[in-house]
Image (cartoon, helix red, strand yellow):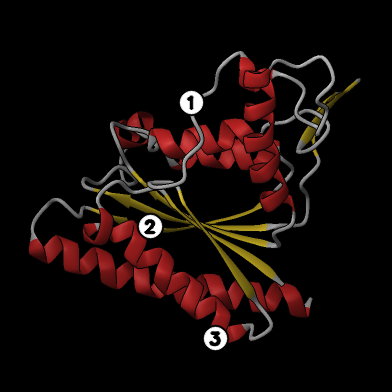
């Protein structure tokens, strides 16, 4: 089994999302000893933001492309192949300015490739990356999940669910720690809750395999 471990936080070792992704990966590997882990740190290895050159054909084609398009094509090809080769994707997604880090958005932009991760049909778009499991470590300084106002301001988990669903992935799970910026007591409570969610997410995976 191939597991892709992705972090996107810009705060390094201070990052709670990085702490949670490590815990999720460790728990998953402990439950699935045959797992091979691959790592992608978008803080140090993020693709450039999406450009017209990056929108060039991205299926390995080089004929008729400029040198800039070839370079961008190679970046996109590396990332989409890594994604498609993975069975499980663990994503660290902190909450920045009501959404996700730009590094994570740039990665998703590179994955959205017609004919590779989705296609358009007569009845609408169809995801082509079916059968994968995504577990997202979602971290937030405030609390957004318990009120209509907070949910309306949240474009982090909702966006990721839409994007992975667009790629055909229906098994998207969230390990959420929110209220991290609301004092030591709130942070400790959030981390305790997240620890329980990690255990539940891994148990769900085992049940899914048994089924």
The image shows residue 95, relative to residue 99, as above or below, that is below
Describe the element under mark 1 as helix, strand or loop.
loop
Task: Give the spatial CA distance, label 3 vs label 2.
Answer: 21 Å
Q: Nearer the viewer, mark 1 or mark 3?
A: 1
Q: Earlier in the sequence, mark 3 or mark 2?
A: 3
Task: Give the spatial CA distance, label 1 vs label 3.
Answer: 36 Å
Which residue shows up at 85% across the image and 20% down it? 63
Asked whether 97 or 65 is in front, the reply is 65
Locate the N terminus and report the quarter of the image it occupies. Answer: bottom right
Q: What residue is disc 1 on?
A: 49
The tag on residue 176 is: 2
Q: Earlier in the sequence, mark 1 or mark 3?
A: 3
The percent position of residue 178, horizontal first and vertical second, equals: 27, 53
Which residue shows up at 68% across the image and 77% down it? 207
The percent position of residue 193, horizontal first and vertical second, equals: 32, 69
Q: Nearer the viewer, mark 2 or mark 1?
A: 1
Q: What residue is disc 3 on?
A: 30
Locate the C terminus and report the quarter of the image it occupies. Answer: bottom right
The percent position of residue 140, horizontal first and vertical second, equals: 28, 48
Q: Is residue 170 in view from this perspective? A: no
Taking the image as shown, residue 10 lies to the left or right of residue 30, namely: left
Describe the element under mark 2 as helix, strand or loop.
strand
Taking the image as shown, residue 4 lies to the left or right of residue 65, namely: left
Q: Are marks 3 and 2 in contact (CB under 8 Å)?
A: no
Which residue shows up at 75% across the image and 29% down it? 58
């Amino acid at each position: 089994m191939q597991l892709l471990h992705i972090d996107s936080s810009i705060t390094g070792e201070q990052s709670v999302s990085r702490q949670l992704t490590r815990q999720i990966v460790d728990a998953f590997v402990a439950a699935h000893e045959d797992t091979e882990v691959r790592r992608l740190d978008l803080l140090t290895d993020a693709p450039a933001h999406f450009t017209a050159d990056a929108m060039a054909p991205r299926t390995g084609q080089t004929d008729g492309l400029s040198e800039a398009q070839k370079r961008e094509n190679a970046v996109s090809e590396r990332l989409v192949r890594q994604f498609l080769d993975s069975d499980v994707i663990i994503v660290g997604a902190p909450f920045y300015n009501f959404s996700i880090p730009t590094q994570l958005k740039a990665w998703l932009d590179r994955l959205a490739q017609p004919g590779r991760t989705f296609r358009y049909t007569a009845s609408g778009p169809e995801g082509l990356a079916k059968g994968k499991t995504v577990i997202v470590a979602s971290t937030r300084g405030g609390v957004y999940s318990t009120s209509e106002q907070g949910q309306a301001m949240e474009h982090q988990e909702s966006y990721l669910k839409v994007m992975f669903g667009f790629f055909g992935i229906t098994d998207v799970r969230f390990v959420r720690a929110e209220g991290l910026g609301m004092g030591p007591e709130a942070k400790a409570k959030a981390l305790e809750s997240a620890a329980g969610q990690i255990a539940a997410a891994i148990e769900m995976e085992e049940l899914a395999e048994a089924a």
